[in-house]
Amino acid sequence: MVVDANSSFFQWVIYIIQNYWPLFLRGAEVTLIISLTGTIIGFTIGILIGIIRTIPIDNNTHILKRAVYKVVNVLLLIYIEVFRGTPMIVQAMVVFYGVAMIWGIHLTTFVAGIFIVSINTGAYMAEIVRGGIISIDKGQFEAAHAIGMTHAQTMAYIVLPQAIRNILPALSNEFVINIKDTSVLNVIGVTELFFQSKSAAGNNYRYFEVFLITCLVYLVMTFTVTRILRYFEKRLEGPDVYTIHGSQTVPEAEIKIVGRQ
Amino acid sequence: MEKIIEVCHLQKFFGENEVLKDINFSVSKGEVVCIIGSSGSGKSTLLRCLNLLEQPTSGEILYHGQNILEHDMSNAVYRAKMGMVFQQFNLFNNLSVLENCTVGQIKVLKRNLQEAKKTAMEYLELVGMSGFIDARPHQISGGQKQRVAIARALSMEPEALLFDEPTSALDPEMVGEVLKVMKSLAGSGLTMLVVTHEMSFARDVAHRVVFMDGGIIAEEDTPDVIFNNPKNERTRIFLKRILDN
């Protein structure tokens, strides 16, 4: 197919799809890998910070421990405030050129991209996880302490499973945001979807046609991811069905109870 | 008889507010002690201090003669010996009925899964909840939750069981099933310390009744003396008010 300046809009769209689909595909792949990895690492960072920031500290805690905790807490707060209070596009520039200049570390743009999305997501998730932990009923902590669990055991077996289930919607939200926001990484030359689109558009001087396709690719990705994650959220709510074993007259009876109250 | 817990000069402040003033009392092995008194008299705070859910401001709590407020004894080890049943049940929402009763055995007492399940089933049977092992806490009624909570505490095979108003959050028709379980436990020789508003339970089941008022133990005696022949004027007024309702 040959196109020129007089070709129609649809001819251009078809031409671009036919000639540039591998480019879009590679861009979408990089976008997905960076946003997925960044979300997972960021979530891990968020959980760790959330756990640290909810460690109970009272007057009985050793003074040295309290001092260390205070310092750590202040550092974490600075991290959270800085990364939530600045645009990711600026963070990308500062981190990518900063580590090269200060430490002489030359990250590949791909690694830098994952790094930036991770620490950015971590800052947001830290507060979400902390909120999730705080929102768990105090009685759950007390009951766990009352059977002799330590704070660490209480968190691991009782509180975090409940908190994480509650923050899953926020996590999938963060993933979808990351799919879209990785587009800013084109400023440091990460070959994600926006970057690839720009070169396709530049080659043909066709910006509207190309970015309309880009738009669709983003939409397909976010829509699919949202549906998949919603499915998992539903499954994690636990079974709707349980069985009552035995009855007073027939010990081997089993009654299935369906639906939640 | 052998004293399990002995409390000496226990004092607890919440800010400026002195909730417990110089409490002295003890619980012996196999004893069933009921703590009664009006709201705000410090009953629950006393019970929570005994399980270190509240840190006493001053005084001593002796467990088999050893002061648990000194730091050489781990809180977790001691707490595992004192079972606690809460007003709000506090079943672990992420776990099934059976898992609620096994998680402490496995993680704290380091029992293996088989052993933990066996013990849990034994106590779930005792409270009449063995049919519901797969249910989640939100799928069962308040009375059933409280019976599971009792089984969970018993599964740890504690030396004493502390009950913090176990029937106060229940619908009236469910109070009976929980009290029935508690009565049978008392009959089996379990050491129990019960904060309650159920006067008939205190009268029928307790070996000793402690009346608290304004952060002090105003009177403690056998149920017979407390209910029929109280020596303290305030005990008399409290019982008259509560029994008239």
Image (cartoon, coloured by chain):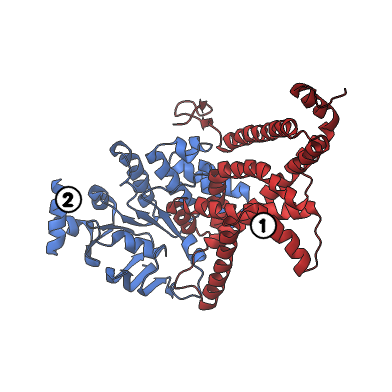
Answer with left or right where residue A258 lies relative to residue B227.
right
Q: Residue furthest bottom?
A: A64
Q: What colour do you see for chain B? A: blue
Q: Can residue B230 be seen at all in this image of the molecule? A: no
Answer with left or right where residue A27 lies relative to residue A236.
right
Q: Nearer the viewer, residue B205 or A67?
A: A67
Q: What colour do you see for chain A? A: red
Task: Say what amino acid the circle numbered 1 marks.
Answer: Gln
- Number of numbered discs visible in the structure rendering: 2
Q: Which residue is mark 1?
A: A91
- Which chain is mark 1 on? A
- Which chain is mark 2 on? B
Tell me, for residue B242, which label it has, or none. 2
- Looking at the rendering, which quadrant does residue B172 occupy? top left
Within 10 Å of the Cα at label 1, are there few (<14), some (14-19), or many (20+) other Cα atoms? some
- Looking at the rendering, which quadrant does residue B144 occupy? top left
- Looking at the rendering, which quadrant does residue A68 occupy? bottom right
For image coordinates 80% across by 39% down, the residue present is A202
Q: Please state, as top left, top right, bottom left or bottom right, where the C terminus of chain A lies in the image.
A: top left
Within 10 Å of the Cα at label 2, are there few (<14), some (14-19), or many (20+) other Cα atoms? few
Q: Determine whether A115 is above or below A227 in the image.
A: below
For image coordinates 73% across by 47% down, the residue present is A34
Tell me, for residue A102, which label it has, or none. none
Query: Measured from the top left, where is residue B11 in percent x and y?
Result: 31, 72
Answer with left or right where residue B219 lies relative to residue A87.
left
Query: Measured from the top left, where is residue B214 in percent x and y?
Result: 22, 65
For image coordinates 81% across by 55% down, the residue present is A108
Q: Determine whether A212 is above or below A58 in the image.
A: above
Tag in front: 1 or 2: 1
Q: Determine whether A137 is above or below B54 in the image.
A: above
